[in-house]
Image: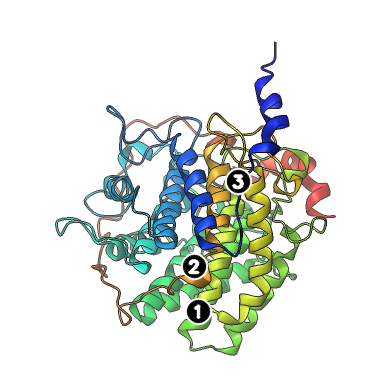
Amino acid sequence: MRNPWPLILALLAGVQAIDMELDDPDSIKNAARSVAKNMLSYYTGNQPGDNPGNLPTPYYWWEAGAMFNSLVDYWFYTGDDTWNDITMQALLWQGGDTGTFMPTNQTRTEGNDDQAFWAFAAMAAAERNFPNPPESSPGWLAMAQAVFNTQAARWDTETCGGGLRWQIFTFNNGFNYKNTISNGCFFNLAARLAKYTGNQTYADWAIKTWDWTHSIGLMTDDWLFYDGADDKSNCTTFNRIQWTYNSGVYLLGAAHMYNFTDGGALWKNRTERILNATDIFFTKDPPDVMYERACEPINTCEVDQRSFKGYLASWMAQTTQIAPFTFDWIMPKLRASAKAAAQTCTGGKDGFACGLHWSQGKWDGTEDVGLQIAALDTIQSTLISRVDPPVTNKTGGTSKGDPGGGGEHHPPPPPVLTVNITTADRAGAGILTVLMSVFVIGSTGWVVYE
């Protein structure tokens, strides 16, 4: 017999909605704390016998990195340091002695995008002046630089004229897939490192990655982004699904390049064009509520995809500080989305589990880490105008760097090949190869091409 409690709780949810007033910072902070607390109820890395930074099955390693990025932001937005210790512990443990975020027990699933999401947490820690780790450990900036260096060494010109492959190791499915999020993360990280350090080399890599993305057609004529391309066809065969986080990762990178070039017209235009294109990810009725258009309307969002909206929200908010001309366009959408998201956070045992369908204005009976990440990122992003912009080496940044970090690149593959991953195992939203695209497009095409 089907468990009736999710439905019963969903019906009762409306009477326990988070009371969040968008013009009251304390109200927003209280809502964020409730959502974050529920999110951490899934975390097992601080329990005996588990590794710091780990989330249990069915959650993926990269999503834990995203969760701790959200907690770095949570501390910065709210001033609440309740979870700073477990955040530092997780980042240091998973970063390892070299700070490259290449733990040997993740070789079965770790791709370039997964590694980058942990690097984003370290980069955010540097940009926000999160408490620095012990002197014996790599600094936050050094970790981000180490990941950048390992990925720059993987830039692959054997096919498609360049780009990063999805997978790092040849034995994993998806090694022949050059996906947008991996390259977008590299672009984003390079642009942020350029801004933080002032080093032109990072900016040159950001330009190179942008130009490659555009030249092979992963960026569409209307400034959206396909999921990726098959390098066996020299990147002429595309998976055309469009996810929120691909637009977001390029948006923030472009905004940083705009800032790095002192407001140059080229990067201003690119930032504006990407931003305007994201309008497809917001509902018309009710207006301005974010949704994952490739899967949400037909209830096919997999575990990792349920968190994607939060990254777009977070990166949009950060864009307002790096490229202030975007503020008036972004903030109404963030505020409407945050209000709608909070109204769904009425489920679960504690009454703060958030739903997937924000536009419904109530909990839909779903629960998981990704849903909490998405809601938390969106809710706390409405505080962006009340906090300082990211620091740099010249504006008070205290994080210790290491431009040559990550020289070992990554550990060698294990002597025995691990089991190949499945579509559900990856941060690339369940897209392994273009051979799978017929199935995926069949289930989502009406949304993509509407």
Of the residues under marks 1 and 2, which one precedes in the sequence? 2
Of the residues under marks 1 and 3, which one precedes in the sequence? 3
Assign a secondary structure to mark 1. helix
Q: Do the residues labelled 1 and 2 touch (CB within 8 Å)?
A: no
Residue 312 placed where, x, y %?
Answer: 59, 59
**CA separation in Å, label 1 and label 2:** 10 Å
Q: Which residue is drawn at 63% across and 69% down?
A: 331
To which quarter of the image does residue 90 belong? Answer: top left
Q: Residue 81 carries which label?
A: none
Q: Residue at x 55, y 79 (%)?
A: 323
Residue 234 in sight here: no
To which quarter of the image does residue 336 belong? Answer: bottom right
State the residue in front, 193 or 13.
13
**Along the horizontal axis of the image, is 418 left or right of 305?**
left
Q: Relative to 140, is 394 above or below? A: below
Q: Label 2 is placed on what type of residue?
A: Phe
Q: Are marks 1 and 3 in contact (CB under 8 Å)?
A: no
Residue 433 placed where, x, y %?
Answer: 62, 44
